[in-house]
Structures are given as structure tokens and as C-alpha cells.
Amino acid sequence: MGYSGVTYRVPCDSGGWSNNPNTDLIKSENMADCSNINLHRGGRETRGGIAEINETPITDSVQVMGIFQFKKKSGTTIIVTGTTDGKIQKDYATELKSGLQTGKYFDFTVFEDNLYICNGYNVPQVWDGALAATHGLGLPAACIGALAGDGAGNVENGTHSYKVTFVTASGETTGSSKSNVVTVADKTANGQVDLTGIAVGPTGTTSRIVYRTVAGDAGDYKLLTTLGNNTATTYTDNVADASLTDTLPTTNTAALIPSDWTGTNFPKAMIKHGRGVSERLWAYGCPSNPEAIYVSTSGAAEFPDATVIKIVIETGDGFGIVGMVEFGDRLIALGKRRPYLIDDTELDTANWGYIDGQWEGGVAHNRLVVKTPNDVIAMSEDGEIYSIISAQTYGDYIAQSLTRPVYIDQWIRENIALSKIAQFHMVYDSVLRAVKIFMVRKNQTYVDVCLVYFIDKNPETGWTKHQLADTYFASCSTEVEVSTGVWKVYAGGVTGHAYSLEEDEANDDGVYYYSGFLLPELNFDNPRTPKRYDKGWLVIKPQGEETITVNLIVDGEYISGGALLIDENGNNIGDEDGEIIGGGSLVEWTITAEGASDKLSNLGFSIGIIGNRIQAEIFNNVVDEKFFVSQILFDHVPLQAMVA
């Protein structure tokens, strides 16, 4: 005998998370709540796990404040990190720089095959991917010293190191980072030192000066020689300590960087913008004059004081420009409250400037604006997440909010510690085609939750929430190409580790996490009519032998107490006198898939409850198990229809 009732279908390919407090009006295909669910494959599935990348933490297990994949034109790729102790590392192990200000976030930009690193406090660092250390912008890189092996010489026995300066018409820079230490054991046998890798200076450099320490590698660096050109990269040192003269300058007078880049007033970030050979670096976020944007020489990462282009934007709020993003051929500068469109179309750079954006709305800081293939997403200081491109068209960032249509803005205000917005960050995941916004919940110290917006959907259907299993996983984030055409989001952690997100195993660094969602209160398009809920069905794509648990809520109450007994077709079971048989208390249903398959499977669970509205919480709470739900079906009988 076939089923004589009605089947109600809930598709899982179109609905996202809605936080509408009026749950009766949440669309049936949406989720009233969710945790650790992805939507990018046409259903609802468990998100991927988090896996540790570097088993050995970065020295001293410090918090990672920036992570980036530096891809050289040669094809070499290097992971570069910046940590809260003011250090920069490559591939988590090799220190490239120390002594920078502590507690600062790092920004990374690649230009002309070099990596530029800013922190808003120290002079921007430059690295070519090969040298043993970074060097300051407008300053020389460290040279390399080695015993020449040419017999007796005058360099005193003991240890020595070297520094280099650039000289211009305006003056001289401070010194480079120190070279490696060279030990002269017996100058009568091997007393000369070959220097290689002496840096060539930027435009305007007329000569270089090499300085050296006396034996013992102590005291001031003293002038060894002047290279009266900007071409030579080698020198052989055969000079006694007594012949060393002037000491290394402590003030930079070479004017190779803007004169107001001094002390602790340096850019927070840089962005590359332009076309072809006219590409330039645009620097912003100097703490003493945050309204200023500095533009490099065309085709070069040079900011000479005499010719640097400086655009000052009066934001009127004291915060200046806190973010910049390029979309198409347009460069957008963002204050905390409004945007500004950079006008750099004139051939004469003297005519460059800006116009106020036609919409209200800014960004909290530079780590909370991200470009997708078809949009720019930003988070403002009040917690609003919106589309910049839509706001540009319609003029109102709140009207173009991505969170308000489903009341996620309300969830943010109620659950997120906006006072810690400086720790929040965004990244675009090109595999999920989703923007991930990492946040700190109230009463938490570090990031522990991530809102996810799937860009191929709309604000009413595109949101989910990922709850991280702990708070040490995601201090910062970036997307990396782990192999040809394979992309992953990497996150820098709080304890010196980096982590890969959306891994195959469903655990966060070995820790279990709940994955599930809650359907809205379903009235089957008729809230006044009681129904007898006979049987439910999960249409799934088996991921293995996963266990899926279903909790049911009828008319606002989790099911408890008596229930009607039904057969596998959803029909009531009666006794010999024809009376319907009642069963015991039902709390949850557990159903298990039978092995991974590309074919859809129907998993059924008997219900036998009467009510007006029904909800289902569908979840997995077993470590390393995932599920994929395509749709949910409810077999039921409208009771008024039965009476009629």
C-alpha cells in the first residue's frame, strides 16, 4: 500500500542562513541557524577541517601577524610571515629581519619581482626572495663577505662585518643591515676579504660607501672605502683597522624617500596600480599624516623626496585613508566613513587628484576589504558588510548591505566584539567562491568565528557561519597556490603555526567540531492546519559511513513524550481493535550512510507526531565525518483534510 499523505520538499541548493527573529517568515529553503556548513556544491555539506602546516612553530611560538605567498617570476614560491615580536621569516624557519616594532600587523605587496612589507611604524622592508635578509626601502641590502684566499693582507685578525650606504646629491643614507661576520684567523696567510653583492642604488645614487668594524666586530662601523659609481658590486678589503676613518651616519639625508617618512611615521600598506610600464606603488597609512597617499616613480618602487607624487585627502575625521583597493582600472581610497575615487588618468601627474565617492560608507581598516572576481566587499567600523560596487551604483552602503536582508547585521551586533575589530580580517576563497570574514566573539580574546558569504548566491541565500574549534587558528589569512591550479586559504595562528583551511579531514588540528543546521519553523504553507508528521527523509550524497543525527522540534518544543507509531510508508499502526498505537519518548533520530558514492541516497526516519509547525536540526557530531544533504522531505497528513 502506497503512502496516502502529502510530501513537503525542502531544497538545500538555494537557501543560506537567515537570522530573522520572526522565524515564521524565514523561507523554508533557508536555515534558521547553522555551524560549519558550506554551500558551494549545490547542497549543504560539512566544511573542510584545519590542518597545521609547520609542525615546528616559528621561533618562540609567537603570534603570526601577516602571512603571504611570494611568487617569483622564475616560479619559485616562498611563504613569508611577520610575527608579533617584530620579525619576518621565510618558510616559517629562516629569519629575514628582526628589530621591527612589536605588535604590528604586516602588509605584503609584490612589485617588479620584489616583495614590499609594511607595518605602519618602520621603514618598509624590501626582499628579492634570494638575499639572506630584507632591507629598508631606499636603503642598501646587506653585502656578503668572504676571505679572499689571496695570501697576506692588512685586515686585522679577528671578526669583522660590513655595512653599505647610498650617496646622492642631497646626502647619505643610514647603513644597510650588517653583512655576515668574517673571521680573519691569520692575516699573514689570508688577510684580505672579498665583498660581493654590494647593492646598486635607485635613481639619483651617485656613489656607495662601505663601512667596517674593527677586529672583534665591536664598536662603530667606520668608513672603509667609497665606490664612486653606482655600478660596481664587488670590492676587496685590504685595509688595516687603523686606516678606517669616519663613522657610519645615524641620520638619513639622501632624500631617497619622502622627508616625512621618518621616526615612526611610515606607511601601513602599499598597493600596485597602473598599466604596463606605468605601474606604480601607492603607499598610505602613515600614522602622523594618514590623509596622505604617496605614489612612486612610474615603473619603479622609488619614492624620492624631490619628485614623489603626494595626494592629500581631507577625510575630516582624523583617521585619513585606512584602505585602498583596485577594481578594474579604478583605484578606490577608503576612509572609515566614505570612499574617494583616485583620478590618475591625466598624463601630467601634476593634475592627479581625487573626487569624493557618491556613496556613504568606508572600511574599518585595510584587512577588511577584499576583491572578488566581480565585486569588492568591505566591512565598516559599525560591523556592516557591504558591496562597494553596488554602493557606488546606488549611493548608500547600508542599502547595499549584504547582511541586513537576513538580519546577520543584528547577529553581529549581539555576538561579535566590535571593540576588537582591529583583529578582524577578510580573505577570498576562490575554491568556495566565498568571502570569509574572521571575527572575535564577545568574551573571547582571539578570532574564533568566520562568517562566509558565497558570491554566486545573493544576500538572502549566500550566508553560513564557521565556528572554529579553538581561538588560536586565524590571526591573519591569505590565499596561496599550493600546486598548479590548486588554491588554499592559509591562516597564521597565535602560537607560531600556520594552518591550511578546508582540508579533507573534518577536524580542526585534530579537534572535533559540530557541523549542522536548523531548519526554520515549517508550516507547509498553512500555519493554521494541524498535521500528522509521519516520516522524514534526507536525500544525501554519501561521503562515507557518516552518522547524521536529526532532532525535531514541533510547535517550538523538542519532541518528548508519546509519539504515534507508523510503518515504513508513514501509515499508522493499529491494534486488533483498530486503535492507533502510541510509542515511547523520542528525542533524536540517528541515521547512517552506507559508504561514499556519487549517487544520491534516501535516508528515512519515522516521526509520528501531530502539530502545526515542525523544525529539524540536522547535524553530525563525530570527528572526521562529513555529510552532504541535497534535500529534505516530510511525509505528512493535513488533519483537517482527513476530517473533511
Image (cartoon, rainbow, N blue to C red):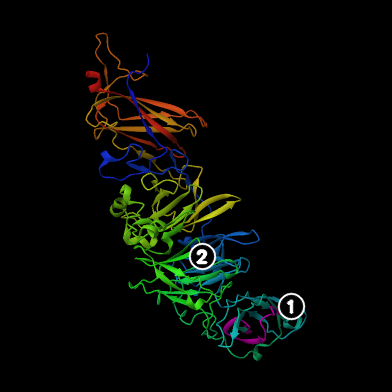
Q: How far across and down, in percent of the image, does residue 118 sit?
A: 49, 69
| Residue 425 within the magenta-colored segment of the rendering | no
CA–CA distance in space, label 1 to label 2: 38 Å
Residue at coordinates 41% horizontally, 49% vertically from top-left? 452
- Residue at 24%, 35% in the rendered image: 556
Q: Callout 2, which amino acid?
A: Phe
Q: Earlier in the sequence, mark 1 or mark 2?
A: 2
Q: Secondary structure at mark 2?
A: strand
Residue 209 visible in the displayed image: no
Quarter holding the C terminus? top left
- What residue is pinned by disc 1? 148
Residue 255 shows in this picture: yes
In front here: 163 or 331?
331
The residue beneath circle 2 is 108
Disc 1 crowd, CA 10 A, few/some/many (<14, 14-19, 20+) = some
The quadrant holding residue 24 is top left
Residue occupying the far right of the picture? 151
Q: Which residues are magenta?
A: 206-234
Q: What residue is at 30 percent from the left and 46 percent from the top? A: 19
Which residue is more in the foreground, 584 or 626? 626
In the rendered image, the vertical position of residue 591 relative to residue 292, given as above or below: above
Percent across and percent down for residue 437 are 41, 54
The image position of residue 257, as x and y in percent, is 52, 79
The picture quadrant where one finds residue 158 is bottom right
395 above or below 510? below
* Residue 206 sits above or below residue 120 on the image: below
Which quadrant is home to the N terminus?
top left
